[in-house]
Amino acid sequence: MTAVASAPGVDHVDQVSASLAAARDHLLGLQHPEGWWKAELETNVTMDAEDLMLRHFLGILDPEVAEASARWIRANQHDDGTWGTFHGAPPDLSTTIEAYVALRLAGDDGASSRMRAAAAWVQGHGGIEASRVFTRIWMAVVGQWDWEDLPVLPPEIMFLPSWAPLNIYDFGCWARQTVVALTVVMAHRPVRPLPFTIDELRASPDAGAGTRAGTRAGTRAGTGAGGGVGPAAGAAAPASAGGLFIAFDRLLHRYERLPRWVLPRNLLRRAALVRAEQWIIRRQEKDGLWGGIQPPVVYSIIALHLLGYPIDHPVMQAALAGLDGFVIHDDRGRRVEACQSPVWDTALAVVALDDAGLDPSHEAQVAAGRWLIGEEITVAGDWAIRRPRLAPGGWAFEFDNDNYPDIDDTAEVILALRRVQKAIGPEAAAACARGVAWTGGMQSRSGGWGAFDADNDSELVASLPFCDFGKVTDPPSADVTAHVIEMLADEPGSPPAAIDRGVAWLSDQQEADGSWFGRWGVNYIYGTGAAVPALVAAGVPRHDPRIRRAVAWLKGHQNPDGGWGEDLRSYVDDQWRGRGHSSASQTAWAVLALLAAGEQHSPATQIGVDWLVASQRADGTWDEPWFTGTGFPWDFSINYHLYRLVWPVMALGRFVRATGGKG
């Protein structure tokens, strides 16, 4: 634990109120005329590398686009020639391989010092052979890896009914959309060769692109050094299941090698591809994308192109236009967002502004509330496979993602709409009621809530040979469950039994040290910052041992400068729990939890608020290069550029109110 050095507290509430006013005004200035907020979601350079490889595959790689993307990729290269997956991250093998190939596509000389350094590091750490399966799929697409040395993912999986093990609905929605498209890609095994070789990225320099490097078990099971979900990302599958799937994968490889004159196999394959095509087409959203996230988008584009859709087909044109909508191009270069978060950002902004004392009838709040109501999803999506009798209602993360509303966004939107409901009218109450009913119906058997689906916790899918990157199921998480409990606790008429089951599940998830794991934010600070306010809102007394243990953990992990921070390495190394550079968002999460626990006058809270005030920039916001958002624990991280503003506004606003000010 870290001891907190003595530091002067905030002189008086007026000083905090001035800081709050500056942050509030900056946030108001970021609102779009239509009522929403949306800031950049910064990820890592694999988004840009894969964008260039996609355009190479389609034959539409423009030199100007390539150079603009290359400028961003170069800017993120470490001094040792490598790339990582977040600010301050250690080198990552697969990211470095993909970035290297992208720079070569953009025309960079492989003989340059920085490229030689990258190649030497890759070769010294196992080469392409040790990279994750998804990187090797890309290398196969560009002719630098043998498709035969990848796991088989047959499109015939589409025929498995929803009750059968390993059916597509056993996957989390993000994995499901990617898997269906990948079955088409892997059935066709396309190759669009690079105009150069990358033998310098192999562990064995004399091994060419066609080699079957590595052991069959290691390659097909995805056990290379570049893979791995990480111990905190999910339970490992039984070793016996892993061995069974390796054997099954060998059998599938034999199935793939059956000649075309084997009629039953060919008829089944054709029917499976038709079903996969129909599934993909039905789920294309109004913005042309799939799921509002990069992986299913790029693989769906490749899959449809292989199925005969030309570039000028309306489906393909809509998809490429939608992907272009994810591009940010400024003086730092061209970069692709993995996703966009307008609904989430807007809901957080409404809550923050209300905490800051902005009148609910203020035009900004009313415009945001009306925009959120317009984003309500009233059609059934994939979630209805497990909840067929549940009426739709809820919100997605993105502008357009009607197939996949998510529980976390829905809870936060309802919390936001309730703040401004009187200024909007009965339509806000009606939308909230539908959202509450839908959220309640999505509670899993265990009592917790996942992000997109109910009871999506199959242990078998993690054993599949290609599941070596990120979490592929959507079991309940502490942070989502906490947000739902906090929302339901404030809803008149919420079923007490659902809240009680949620509280029991959340209590069971508390770590031995008093913290909670953070699935969608980094990490134990995020989980604890969500759980404490939720439990207090649900009626758990502030003197309850669960609350006091959490408070003790937060106080014990406050940095000497007064702030809080946690490095992403806490997902794979317990020594990093609650440790890292102080950041505005993580400090705000800790302060919010302490305030909920009645600690507004404690030195830890006072000094945390003091850190926020002292580190604020002249424009009212905060610097935050650190990634505090999570896509897949450890494997994929996000820097939400609005987090550095909305969470501190909430924390400062609640502190001012708790200590007698008006905001």
Image: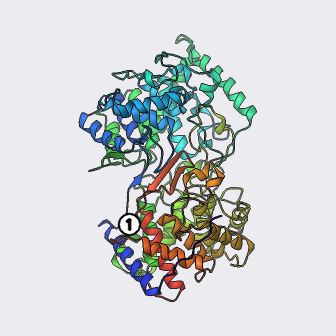
Residue 477, by quadrant, is bottom right
Position of 144 with respect to 515 (left or right) is: left
Tag 1, which secondary structure? Answer: helix
**Is residue 428 visible to the viewer in this orientation of the structure?**
no
Where is 397 relative to 411, above or below?
Answer: above
Position of 221 with respect to 201 (left or right) is: right
Query: 178 and 653: which one is in front?
Result: 653
Residue 467, by quadrant, is top right
Indicate the quadrant containing the N terminus: top left, top right, bottom left or bottom right.
Answer: bottom right
**Is residue 150 visible to the viewer in this orientation of the structure?**
yes
Amino acid type, callout 1: Trp
Residue at position x 39%, y 48% from top?
Answer: 337
Residue at position x 47%, y 49% from top?
Answer: 86
Indicate the quadrant containing the C terminus: top left, top right, bottom left or bottom right.
Answer: bottom left
The residue under label 1 is 371
Position of 160 with respect to 183 (left or right) is: right
How far from the left and from the top, in percent, is residue 400? 41, 53
Where is 120 relative to 257, above or below?
Answer: below
Query: 66 and 259: which one is in front?
Result: 66
How far from the left and from the top, in percent, is residue 38? 37, 60
